[in-house]
Amino acid sequence: MDTTDDLVIGLRAGNRAALARAITLVENNGKGTGDLLQKLAPSLGHSMVVGFTGAPGAGKSTLVGAYVRELRSRGKSVGVIAVDPSSPLSGGAVLGDRIRMSEHATDPDVFVRSLASRGHLGGLSRSASHVIDIMDAFGKDVIVLETVGAGQSEVEVADIADVKVVVCAPGLGDDVQAIKAGILEIADILVVNKADNPLAERTARQLEARTTGALSRKIPVLKTIAVENQGLDLLSEAIETQHHLRDHAQKEKDRPRKLLKTTTLEFLSSKLDEDNQALDLISEKLVRGEISFEEAARQCLEIASKQV
């Protein structure tokens, strides 16, 4: 079994097997995960992270595959994290996105990994952020993160990606007006894919009008035909432009804070699960009206702290 030092050496040497093993370790939260991430911390900050999100049916996976193709034509090395729905039997990723990107399987400068969402409503696997760090330390120029496609819950991608691309299908019609500000506010770029559809131009105009009226900033609206590789050069340039506009210094501070809060909550939850009897007693008091929710929460924190 590899030690964390072995994995670090392998990652820095560009060993793909070490990359795969390191990702498996953090995805399963295996022993040594914390030590590995700590040792890799000084090596981070090289990669550009691009998040693709949007509702199912917009051709998101096809667009991601075409974008990877465009990046390779520019000499960029690429890591792809495709967050798939979980199998109801095994809990693992269904692997649909990896199958659709099989054209890149033999390219040594492209590494595709499917992660299971495992019921996480934000559209991202809990381990996705750590997998990004590992690919970053490995030396990938661009890391592409494709989310499940659950709709409005996809805003979590904003906490991780440097540039957020929201993919829309043509023919939204009046539904454009129903798009909540949440999914628009995270977008750095809006893409109407399948632009050969006669309704694509109308959809693009509606999105431009919707974002101009709802937001204080102008969001680029682009049209692509991913299956024909059309519009990918403009999309790639727009992503580079948006990346240069980011406040990376602030992001370096914000991302660890948000991840720390999430990890702390998950840690407390796991500790509470270790003492179901005490948790049941507190719940019963709450139901009987003997204590408030605030007091119940305080008692839960005390239980979790004793488990540390």
Image (cartoon, rainbow, N blue to C red):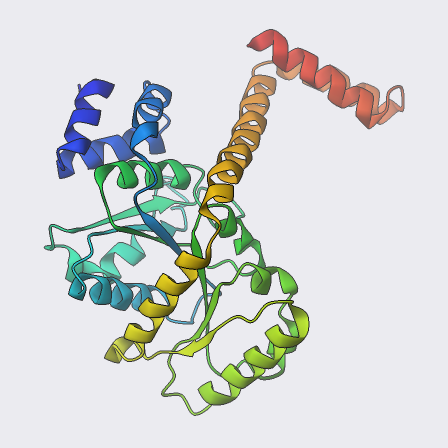
Establish if 83 lies above or below 275.
below
Q: Name the outermost residue toward the bottom.
A: 198
Q: Using the image as rendered, state which of residue 56 and residue 130 is in the foreground.
A: 130
Left or right position of 109 against 146:
left
Percent coordinates x, y for residue 37 in the rendering = 34, 26
Toward which corner of the image does residue 151 lie, by quadrant?
bottom right
- Asked whether the viewer can see residue 213, the reply is yes
Task: Give the residue drawn at x 64%, y 68%.
Answer: 215
Establish if 257 lies above or below 149.
above
Toward which corner of the image does residue 21 lie, by quadrant?
top left
Toward which corner of the image does residue 283 lie, by quadrant?
top right
Q: Using the image as rendered, state which of residue 301 and residue 15 is in the foreground.
A: 15
The quarter of the rendered structure image containing the C terminus is top right
Percent coordinates x, y for residue 148 in the rendering = 43, 55
- Asked whether the viewer can see residue 148, the reply is no
Establish if 114 lies above or below 259.
below
Q: Name the outermost residue toward the right.
A: 289
Left or right position of 57 against 15:
right
Left or right position of 157 against 233:
right
Left or right position of 246 against 229:
right
Percent coordinates x, y for residue 256 in the rendering = 49, 34
Q: Using the image as rendered, state which of residue 193 and residue 116 is in the foreground.
A: 193
Q: Name the outermost residue toward the top.
A: 306
Task: Give the residue drawn at x 15%, y 51%.
Answer: 109
Task: Give the residue drawn at x 26%, y 55%.
Answer: 98
The quarter of the rendered structure image containing the N terminus is top left
Task: Give the residue drawn at x 28%, y 66%.
Answer: 67
Percent coordinates x, y for residue 105 in the rendering = 15, 55
